Amino acid sequence: MKTKETTYNGVVINGFAVLFFNLVVLPVIAFLDLYILGDVLWLSLPVLFVLVLAFILMLPGYFSQEPNEARVMVFFGKYEGTFKETGFFWVNPFMNKKKLSLRARNLDVEPIKVNDKIGNPVLIGLVLVWKLKDTYKAMFEIDAQTMADKGNGQVSVTVAGRMNAFEDFVRVQSDAALRQVAGQYAYDDDAHDVDGLTLRGGGEEINDQLEKQLNERLAMAGMEVVEARINYLAYAPEIAAVMLRRQQASAIITAREKIVEGAVSMVKMALQKLSAEEVVELDEEKKAAMVSNLLVVLCADEPAQPVINSGTLNH
């Protein structure tokens, strides 16, 4: 018993040759039968019946196939192989030819709410490109026929029905993989692990992890993920405002650090210039007052209001 995809090696005939036989040869034989054995009804009628029956039975054997399509051949419940050649063909009319598409398909997974590594609820969405890789697993390892039922009591046998069933399977597994990967990383910088990988800054590494998880989950169904990318990432609404204020506070602190660093550098340069060029002699108390005034001026959010001292420095 076959347990993996194999190439169909049964009888496959060019469809146009069989069509010529059906439309030309069989009618000619029927005409000759009536012409030669017309007077012998007990013999000519059975021959005519057999010819008509052969014509009707041969009709289901025709099929055409385009590039990146496949037919899973099943003969009375037995898997005979997968046929992937393109063109117009004829096979055993009793062969069940289940059509599948091997073309790449897009899937846009709607954003779902998950908890990141540190417990923050985030909304994360995914877009991926997938296609069928193993037609045997796709048809017989998962219950695609029942999934294609659509709840109407009749199992869909169209390629659209099967592919939609496969897409539903991919969607469910994508949801599970996305939750697993998102739970392993923090949304943003973790205070306890500032050098760790995050969902927002991980980029290609996070996408690679997601693609790996998806391929592991979909391998049993004969499907392959060509590409997977996070296309939506945001804090959940209930904490979005708080996290925005946290980000703003972090930005303000970073900006203040730069301002203080620049102000100290400028004060140091001013003191060195005054001392080198002997503009004025300042004792330690005056230097401290000057440093304090300069830092207030340079670090203030609003323009400073100067106070003119009309006395001497010693006043």
Image (spheres, rainbow, N blue to C red):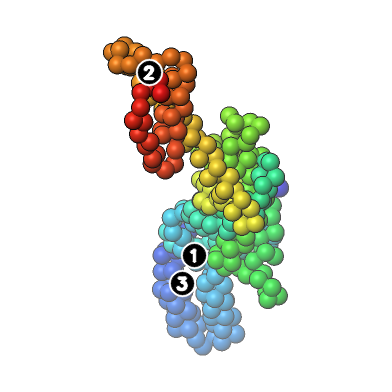
Which of the 4 image quarters holds residue 158?
A: bottom right
Residue 233 in the image: state x and y as whole percent: 55, 50
Q: Nearer the viewer, mark 3 or mark 2?
A: 2
At label 1, counting other C-alpha atoms closer than 10 Å, the crowd grade (few under 14, some 14-19, many 20 or more) is: some
Left or right, residue 151 beside residue 69: right
What residue is shown at x 66% (from left), y 32% (from top)? 192
Q: Amino acid at mark 1?
A: Phe
Q: Residue 72: where, in percent of width, then height?
A: 58, 56
Residue 209 position within the rendered picture, expressed as x and y whole percent measured from the top left:
59, 39
Q: Quadrant of residue 144?
A: bottom right
The span from disc 3 to disc 2 (Cα, nearest Å) is 106 Å
The residue tagged 2 is 271
Left/right placement of residue 131 relative to residue 139 reads left
- Tag 3: residue type? Asn
Residue at 58% over, 63% down: 164
Badge 3 is on which residue? 22
Q: Looking at the image, is mark 3 or mark 2 earlier in the sequence? A: 3
Q: Is residue 289 visible?
A: yes
The secondary element bearing badge 1 is classed as strand
* Residue at which label 1 appears: 63
Instruction: State how far apart marks 1 and 3 are (Cα).
Output: 15 Å
Query: Disc 2 marks which amino acid?
Result: Leu
Would you place residue 42 above or below residue 272 in this image?
A: below
264 versus 55 height, above or below:
above
